[in-house]
Image (cartoon, rainbow, N blue to C red):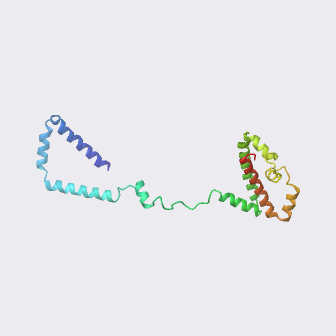
Amino acid sequence: MFGFGLVGLAGTVVAGVLVFAPDALGGLLPTLRQATEMVDPLWVGALVGVVGLLTAWHVGHGGRRTTSFDSAVETPPESVTAEETPLSGAGLDERYESAVADEPGAMDALVDRLRATAVTTYALEAEVARERATRAVADGEWTDDTVAAALLSPDRPQPLVARLRLWLDPESERERRVKRTVSAIDDLRRGPS
């Protein structure tokens, strides 16, 4: 395609010179007339036909580039084209279910996630530095809920009733602890009632 553009540019320049400054070509004009008289019109027609066919083939096959319009026609935006991916909360749901089922390491991973959320929420709502919020969560000062505070604080023991519940019905007690912690974090976010 670049070659056609160059030929077109050269032809435009020559035509412009012939129209606006024919004297600039001087003695070249008679030579051009003699050259055109020697050329057989049949050969010129054949050459033009071959160039036209090659151009048509190139445009129809190899020269076509995909545009955004072509892409939209092939897969319209109205159709569902997104790959199936898990929803944003699906990973947290899986961690929660694994932690409640007491799969190895699952509770620790969930507690780490909840601790990070509690630190961020406390820092934003109490308007304190992140280091201060980290200490508050580690010390259990971030909430009045003793179960939630003990879940996120490695140094705080769970209340006696919670420890008994864990012994009697471990799965529901783990679930209760996580739900109480989430609720305490949500209470932080909502502020004092």
Can you give x and y, in whole percent of width and height, for residue 85 in the image? Answer: 59, 60
Q: Is residue 103 visible?
A: no
Give above or below for 28 relative to 112: above
Q: Is residue 89 left or right of residue 69?
A: right
Residue drawn at point x = 79 percent, y = 48 percent: 143
Can you give x and y, in whole percent of width and height, for residue 110 in the image? Answer: 73, 55
Determine the residue located farthest toward the front in the rendered image: 193
Q: Is residue 6 visible?
A: yes
Count of numbered circles in the view: 0
Determine the residue located farthest toward the right in the rendered image: 160
Q: Is residue 75 left or right of residue 142?
A: left
Q: Quadrant of residue 128?
A: top right
Q: Is residue 106 left or right of residue 59?
A: right
Give above or below for 135 relative to 48: above
Depth order, front residue of 43/159: 159
Can you give x and y, in whole percent of width and height, for residue 92 in the image? Answer: 68, 57
Can you give x and y, in whole percent of width and height, for residue 150 in the image? Answer: 82, 52
Residue drawn at point x = 42 percent, y = 59 percent: 73
Residue drawn at point x = 25 percent, y = 58 percent: 53
Residue drawn at point x = 25 percent, y = 43 percent: 10
Depth order, front residue of 8/189: 189
